[in-house]
Image: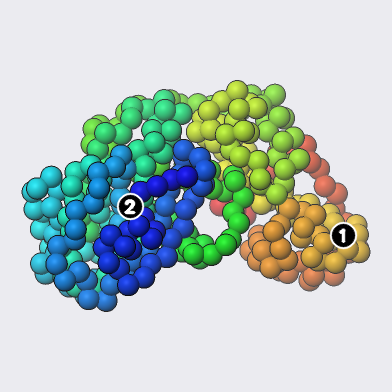
């Protein structure tokens, strides 16, 4: 289980009034932890020193601070003053560099705990040099990290189950962005890959259709195709035009359409048979992709049934609908 400066440990260490936390992928080496902290009046004094650990802490601000006069950070004993901070502004700490913060006004932020082992797993599988240091201009907005973090907020402090493939790709996306944009050296050349071979496409499709609920991990899927998780994810998107979990979403909707047309099952049963976690998730996804509710679509198309073709790749029209 991942341990470090996040969640309740972070709350106790900095004497915070409250916080909420989300741990992505507990029980494995590839993990991230998100802790939301909100202090209306900031810290009254410099923050206490944190124990050294092999990890980075990235903070992203969900709102633009009212003012940042007196803000700054000590890193390895050297003070770095802050003059500006945007909505979505970030700061990255190496937790082995004795970081101490000075925040004399209120803020609302999410701290993302990134173990070095998580980044190492990504770079090793991608054929890239390992990340030594992450550098950023404090307070500068990063829209990718801001949107990624906002997408995680509904799950913080909730017992919400996310399919393994979704978690794999969320972590992969985050690590790729950090490594590409904030590593301290010149960007290492990436290993270019084409699409999957025909046998790999067939194997991947068969496994995905047998695990349409998304509980098959990306690493297992990649292993079955003789690839690393990172290379498989890139090659799959090149072959099918969409990431793995989006392919699954499209297939769930396609399956649901067939069940809506050729059965009289209630919508909840169809939702579960098609791999959705519940009827509300089914309704939201179906409406987002099709433009109408499942019940309305069933009434409109009952007289014009469509067949389900499991072996065909995702059609261009479906890809276009997902962007």
Horizontal and vertical percent position of residue 209: 74, 41
Image location (x, y in percent) of residue 293:
73, 69
| Residue 190, placed above or below residue 106 | above
Q: Horizontal and vertical percent for residue 169?
A: 52, 44
The one nearer the camera, 155 or 60, is 155
- Relative depth, front residue between 224 and 98: 98
Q: Is residue 286 above or below residue 98?
A: below
Say the numbered circle drawn on residue 261: 1
- Kindly report the distance in space between the C-alpha atoms of the residues bearing marks 2 and 1: 52 Å
Q: Quadrant of residue 247?
A: top right
Do the residues under discs 2 and 1 have CB atoms within 8 angstroms? no
- Rendered image quadrant of residue 108: bottom left
Colour scheme used in the picture? rainbow
Residue 241 sits in quarter: top right
Closest to the camera, between mark 2 and mark 1, is: 2
Whether residue 245 sits left or right of residue 145 in the image: it is: right
Q: As drawn, is 190 to the left or to the right of 299?
A: left
Where residue 5 is drawn, which disc sits there?
2
Q: Is residue 141 visible?
A: no
Does residue 14 appear anywhere in the picture?
A: yes
């Amino acid at each position: 289980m991942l341990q470090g400066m996040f969640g309740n440990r972070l709350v106790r260490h900095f004497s915070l009034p409250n916080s909420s936390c989300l741990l992505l992928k507990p029980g494995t080496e590839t993990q991230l932890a998100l802790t939301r902290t909100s202090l209306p009046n900031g810290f009254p004094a410099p923050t206490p020193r944190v124990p050294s650990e092999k990890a980075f802490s990235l903070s992203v601000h969900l709102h633009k601070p009212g003012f940042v006069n007196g803000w700054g950070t000590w890193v390895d004993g050297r003070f770095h003053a802050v003059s500006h901070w945007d909505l979505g502004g970030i700061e990255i700490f190496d937790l082995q560099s004795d970081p101490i913060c000075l925040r004399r006004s209120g803020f609302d932020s999410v701290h993302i705990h990134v173990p070095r082992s998580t980044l190492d797993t990504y770079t090793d599988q991608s054929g890239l040099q390992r990340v030594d240091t992450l550098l950023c201009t404090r307070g500068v907005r990063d829209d990718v990290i801001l949107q990624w973090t906002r997408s995680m907020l509904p799950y913080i402090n909730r017992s919400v189950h996310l399919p393994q493939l979704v978690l794999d790709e969320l972590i992969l996306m985050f690590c790729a962005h950090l490594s590409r944009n904030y590593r301290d050296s010149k960007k290492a050349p990436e290993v270019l890959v084409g699409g999957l071979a025909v046998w790999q496409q067939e194997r991947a499709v068969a496994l995905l259709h047998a695990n349409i609920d998304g509980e098959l991990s990306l690493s297992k899927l990649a292993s079955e195709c003789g690839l690393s998780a990172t290379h498989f994810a890139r090659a799959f998107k090149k072959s099918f035009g969409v990431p793995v979990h989006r392919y699954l979403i499209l297939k769930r909707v396609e399956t649901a359409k067939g069940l809506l047309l050729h059965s009289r099952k209630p919508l909840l049963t169809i939702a579960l048979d098609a791999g959705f976690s519940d009827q509300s998730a089914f309704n939201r996804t179906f409406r987002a992709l099709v433009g109408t509710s499942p019940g309305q679509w069933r009434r409109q198309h009952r007289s014009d049934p469509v067949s389900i073709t499991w072996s065909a790749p995702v059609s261009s029209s479906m890809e276009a609908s997902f962007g």
